Amino acid sequence: MEASEKRKHWRWTVSAALANYLDSGSIVSGASALTLWTAQFHLSNTTVGLLGALSSNAISAGIGALIGGRICDKFGRKKIYAYDLLVYIIGMLILICSVTPWMLFVGYIIAGLAVGADIPASWTLIAEQAPTESRGKHGGFAQALWSLGPVCTLALSFLLTPLGIWGARLVFLHLIIIAFITWLMRHDMTESKTWEEEKDKLKNSIESEKIKVSSLFKGANLKALIFLVVMYGVWNLVAGTGGFFLPYILQKFGSQSQGTSVALQCLEFAISVLTTIVIFMRFSDNGLGRKWVFFIGALVNVISMALFAFCKLNFVISLSYVLLWGIGQGMAQQPFFQLWSSELFPTRFRATAQGIMFSIVRISLGLWSFFVPILANLGFQGLAFTMTIFLLISMIVGVVFAPKTSGKSLKEIEIERNLNI
């Protein structure tokens, strides 16, 4: 491939992948502000759990993905780009201006719907526009941005800690700026050729029009849905808990300060960025390398949570958890979910499938998040042991049922898996 073509593909990947930055940034900006909001608005454990459940970390993003995914398959991959980030900006502005608890809920729900709708569009575009031999590398870059969002957000939160609630508002302001820049960058993106070819095929084939969305719940499509929802969804119950509640947990149960807890979470995501770039992006396009990368990363995650389950929560244990979780997060379930969810479904329903899975995963996380503060108060180590079991289940499912799709074009995978029948 010519250098100019490679640059074009990477430019498209960056424009689409910034959705990951905005998604994760919105989650951890709330995580770093959570203790400040709790103190300012006198939030109960129930209210904290409900905020986590309805935020962009969970239910609102899940509903947005369900809607956005279907729009992408019916009207084009980039159709959603005209409006979603403008809606995201409105949600962030409400969070910045919040003076009562209900404004926190409204702002997070609006932002969650917008970023949720963006995710299936961006992941699908990245996969369909990336060269076959480097699809994992392009997807990995998107995941590196997913971890970079928290790094920048938490670094800002740490630096602005002395400003209290005003520091948190400035953190949300930086996400507004990134969202507006991303919206401008996307104006010259071209539509996915893969989608346009599929659209033409549907116009010219009466038989193919008989294939409905319900085919996603049959045969190979159904197996892929179940595999990915279990593998990623169970893992995400743990990751989502850490993403939104880790500073809250470290302060309440580990006696860490606001600044220290935010710094530890920032370090965790910085390690994830490095791991994704150095390991996942290097080996994810190699068939044998994929399974080993997934297994090692998933195992490290199990070990990290086991520390919380069996050891007293102090600074050393917190730091050890952060180091190990950062490594596993950057090379296992999170990046592989994006990659496999793009590979295992037919073009005509690819974004819809991602939206369905993302909604199931995030809504499940929302229901779980509602009970996290309550369960933690009843016994933090018991909660950590339960999450260790979740991670073990996810690891086993991922290793046993990992698909052999590396080095194959999306069309070749579609034909091989007989996905349109």
Image (cartoon, helix red, strand yellow):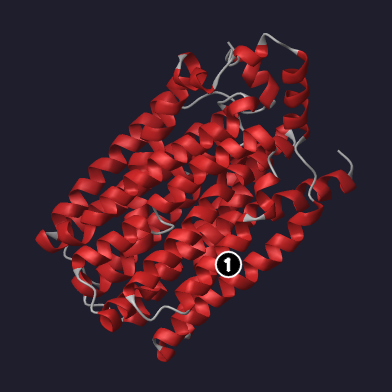
Residue at (67% x, 51% y) in the render: 81
| Residue 340 screen position, x and y as percent | 54, 33
- Give the left or right position of residue 190, taking residue 277 as reference: right
Q: How many marks?
A: 1
Q: Is residue 206 above or below residue 121?
A: above
Instruction: Please tell me which residue lies in front, 207 or 196.
Output: 207
Q: Looking at this view, is 161 or 264 the one in front?
A: 161
Quadrant location of the N terminus? top right
Q: Where in the figure is residue 259, as x and y percent of width and height?
A: 37, 81
Q: Is residue 33 left or right of residue 202?
A: left
| Residue found at the far left of this picture | 378
Regarding residue 408, the answer to whether it shows in the image is no
User: Residue at the bottom extreme?
Assistant: 162
Which image quadrant: the C terminus?
top right
Residue drawn at (57%, 36%), measured in percent from left and top?
70
Image position, residue 290 (x, y; %): 53, 34
**Residue kind at label 1, given as amino acid type:** Ile
Q: Determine if residue 61 is in view.
A: yes
Label 1: which secondary element: helix
Vertical arrangement, residue 88 with respect to residue 93, above or below? above
Residue 58 placed where, x, y %?
39, 52
Most foreground residue, 48 or 110: 110
The crowd level at tag 1 (other Cα within 10 Å; few <14, some 14-19, many 20+) is many
Mark 1 lies on residue: 89
In the figure, residue 379 lies in which quadrant?
A: bottom left
Q: Residue at x 24, y 51 (%)?
A: 306
